[in-house]
Amino acid sequence: MLLIKDPGARIDYAFDWGDAYLDGQTIEDASWAVEPDVDGGVAVAGASHDLLRCAATIAGGVAGGLYRVTNRVTLSDGQIDERSIMLRVEER
């Protein structure tokens, strides 16, 4: 999935893990990562999760840059999974 983000915007993005395949599992741990991790690039300004959903506030970025933002979760049964979005930063 490719989304457009303005470099000055701070926007919340979320993954609803409960809508996919969780069958009684819950989210025990969650983390977020941005690639490439460069000065002035897109950054995770804050993050949260509950039992089924993860959210992150994404800020910054260099116009013209393309970034992968990945949410990695560990489920209550020990499974680990990841989901990513691609962000293209453009002046709007």
Image (cartoon, rainbow, N blue to C red):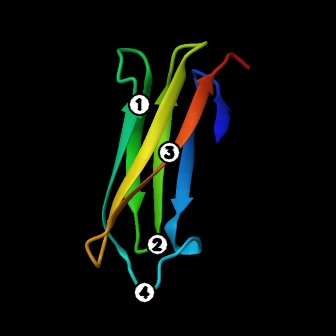
Front disc: 2 or 1: 2
Residue 83 lies, in percent from the top left, at 48, 51
Label 3 and label 2: CA atoms lie apart by 16 Å
Q: Which residue carries the number 3 mark? A: 84
Query: Type of residue at label 1?
Result: Ala
At 31% from the left and 69% from the top, the residue drawn is: 79
Residue 57 lies, in percent from the top left, at 48, 43
- Marks 3 and 2, the one that precedes in the sequence: 2
- Marks 1 and 3, the one that precedes in the sequence: 1
Residue 51 found in image quarter: bottom left
Q: Which residue carries the number 4 mark? A: 24
Label 1 and label 4: CA atoms lie apart by 32 Å
Label 3 element class: strand
Q: Which residue carries the number 2 mark? A: 52
Report the quarter where the C terminus lies: top right
Front disc: 1 or 3: 3
Q: Are marks 1 and 3 in contact (CB under 8 Å)?
A: no
Q: Are marks 3 and 2 in contact (CB under 8 Å)?
A: no
Q: Which residue carries the number 1 mark? A: 43
Residue 48 found in image quarter: bottom left
